């Protein structure tokens, strides 16, 4: 994966995890023009989630999850794609817009600053809190000395 | 004579209206919101997602509400909904070693890298009803202990070095059984069995798993590791040159480790049973792992002597939507079937009585 691809995938990782409301608020605040046309209107479907036998063996089908996909095109020709868990059509379209505007050189910085950075901060804070709460339930074992001395 | 009958439309309509009323219950009590169900009856939603084989918390909550809390009915609703959606593809296999851990325990190793974390568990509670929960009080905020992210390798990877635990064959992406696409044909490969077990009825698998512990297909299990947490889903799509991250889902994984005395094919070692389930459900993941191991009897050269080792028996009866459909259809009208049976029994009765009379006459003649 090239550096650009890695950043693009990383942004998708963040936007797909965001709640629809939080993402919509960030998107509105970013103030980028909604001048995109829909190449693919948001469409809900299924993706079969795979696991591995024993965690590390051959793949098997675990079950399905709902996924919504969308694609938009900017006047400059940039095509933004979105595939996100769930059935939130509005969120899928915003994710596709973010992907498109990130590809558009003139708006890339604005996407990074107004959407990606605050989103990353929020989602990382959530993970840090989860880890800290779980870490508080970590077991510290004591060795009991027993027997005759 | 066969007489077709119609009727009951008004009765059915009114029955469904009555159902809607009873579902709502006392109208002076506030209605449940889907967010309340998803947040506060989270494990019911998890079960519906796992056995409905559809990860979608909101739909799971809606199904629980619509089914009045009848989880098998809710699972049925979710299964029916699944069939209305197109399939975009198969994800890359999830990497459970990279899970954002919410709970992780091992019954075999006290000190393992990453530690034992109890997480939000019912274990060690006293199972005393808590009258305070009848009210609306807020619990204390959970304790926090800031930590650096630490790798938490799967326990089975730790034992691998000595060769004392069997390795899993890597397998291929190209030939993965999909029981939702092809009819199930026995014998199944392990991937097909795991797919069926992952959506199988928790109670059915729990009973079978228990039977293995009680001596039917005994295989000395230990919980090598049980972990719950979020894993990322990635999908390869034609439009993009990299796997697309779709978001995270919560899963429960159980690595069961079983003593094995060895066979003509394999040296003495620990064999493994595997459980992976949508949502937080360690009972189901453990039962799945015990059943998975028991069902490997053929592969490991063990005698097949117990129900838990009988693949066709288990896989054919583990799906609660199929099972409830066939059991519950018995309450639908069988008037014509029964009329035919009734005639048959009457005929047999007449023949039996005629036979009795003839025997009686013969006995009297002989005397």
Image (cartoon, coloured by chain):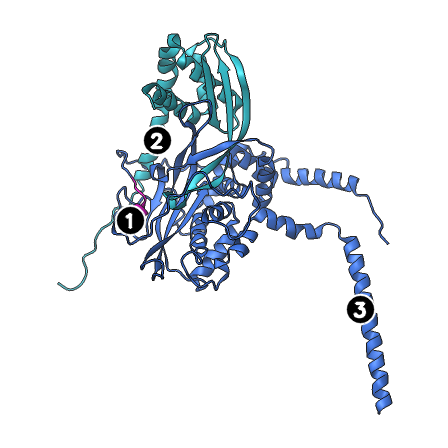
Q: What whole-number distance in Å separates the C-alpha atoms at marks 3 and 1?
A: 67 Å
Image: A48 above or below A37: below
Q: Quarter-wise, where is residue B352 in the image?
A: bottom right
Q: Tag on residue A127?
A: 2
Q: Quadrant of the N terminus of chain A?
A: top left
Circle 2: element type? helix
Q: What whole-number distance in Å separates the C-alpha atoms at marks 1 and 2?
A: 30 Å
The span shown in magenta is: B152-160
Image: B347 above or below A130: below
Q: Chain A appears in which tint?
A: cyan
Q: Residue furthest bottom?
A: B367
Q: Which residue is mark 3?
A: B348
Circle 3: element type? helix
Give the residue displayed 79% in from the left and 43% down from the top.
B8
Classed neighbour count for the residue bearing mark 2: other residues with Cα under 10 Å, few (<14), some (14–19), many (≥20): some
Q: Chain B appears in which tint?
A: blue
Q: Which residue is mark 1?
A: B160
Q: Which chain letter matches label 3?
A: B
**Is the same chain shared between marks 1 and 2?**
no
Q: Which chain letter matches label 2?
A: A
The image position of residue A14, as x and y in percent, is: 39, 24
- Number of the front mark, 3 or 1: 1
Give the residue displayed 43% in from the left and 25% down from the top.
A16
Classed neighbour count for the residue bearing mark 1: other residues with Cα under 10 Å, few (<14), some (14–19), many (≥20): few
Classed neighbour count for the residue bearing mark 3: other residues with Cα under 10 Å, few (<14), some (14–19), many (≥20): few
- Number of the front mark, 1 or 2: 1
Q: Nearer the viewer, residue B298 or A69?
A: B298
């Amino acid at each position: 994966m090239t550096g650009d691809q890695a950043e693009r995938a990383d942004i998708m990782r963040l936007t797909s995890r965001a709640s629809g409301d939080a993402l919509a608020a960030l998107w509105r605040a970013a103030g980028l023009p909604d001048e995109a046309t829909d190449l693919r209107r948001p469409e809900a479907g299924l993706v079969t989630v795979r696991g591995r036998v024993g965690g590390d063996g051959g793949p098997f089908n675990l079950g399905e999850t709902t996924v919504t996909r969308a694609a938009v095109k900017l006047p400059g020709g940039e095509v933004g794609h979105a595939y996100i868990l769930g059935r939130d059509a509005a969120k899928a379209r915003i994710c596709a817009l973010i992907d498109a505007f990130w590809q558009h050189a003139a708006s890339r910085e604005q996407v990074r600053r107004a959407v990606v950075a605050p989103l990353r901060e929020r989602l990382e804070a959530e993970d840090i809190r989860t880890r800290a709460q779980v870490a508080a339930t970590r077991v510290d074992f004591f060795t009991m000395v027993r027997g005759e001395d | 004579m066969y007489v077709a009958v119609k009727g009951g439309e008004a009765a059915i309509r009114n029955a469904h209206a009555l159902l809607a009323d009873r579902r709502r219950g006392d109208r002076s009590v506030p209605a449940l919101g889907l967010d309340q169900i998803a947040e506060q009856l989270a494990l019911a939603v998890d079960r519906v997602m796992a056995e409905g084989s559809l990860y979608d918390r909101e739909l799971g909550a809606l199904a629980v509400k619509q089914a009045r809390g009848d989880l098998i009915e809710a699972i049925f609703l979710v299964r029916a909904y699944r069939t209305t959606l197109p399939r975009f593809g198969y994800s890359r296999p999830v990497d459970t070693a990279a899970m954002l851990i919410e709970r992780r325990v091992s019954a075999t190793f006290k000190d393992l890298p990453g530690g034992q974390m109890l997480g939000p568990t019912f274990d060690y509670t006293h199972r005393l009803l808590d009258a305070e929960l009848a009210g609306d009080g807020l619990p204390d905020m959970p304790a926090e202990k800031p930590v650096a992210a630490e790798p938490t390798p799967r326990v089975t990877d730790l034992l691998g070095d000595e060769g004392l635990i069997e390795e899993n064959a890597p397998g291929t992406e190209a030939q993965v059984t999909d029981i939702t696409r092809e009819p199930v044909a026995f014998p199944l490969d392990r991937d097909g069995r795991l797919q069926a077990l992952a959506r199988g009825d928790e109670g059915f698998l729990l009973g079978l798993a228990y039977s293995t512990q009680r001596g039917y297909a005994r295989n000395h299990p230990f919980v090598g590791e049980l972990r719950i947490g979020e894993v990322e889903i990635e999908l390869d799509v034609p439009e993009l040159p990299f796997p697309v991250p779709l978001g995270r889902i919560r899963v429960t994984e159980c690595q069961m480790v079983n003593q094995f005395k060895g066979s003509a094919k394999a040296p003495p070692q620990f064999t493994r049973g595997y459980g992976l389930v949508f949502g937080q459900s360690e009972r189901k993941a453990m039962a799945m792992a015990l059943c998975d191991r028991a069902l490997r009897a053929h592969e490991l050269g063990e005698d097949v002597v117990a129900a838990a080792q009988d693949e066709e028996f288990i896989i054919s009866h583990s799906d609660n939507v199929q099972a409830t459909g066939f059991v519950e259809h018995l309450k639908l009208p069988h008037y014509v079937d029964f009329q035919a049976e009734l005639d048959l029994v009457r005929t047999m009765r007449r023949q039996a009585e005629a036979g009795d009379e003839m025997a009686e006459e013969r006995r009297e003649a002989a005397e």
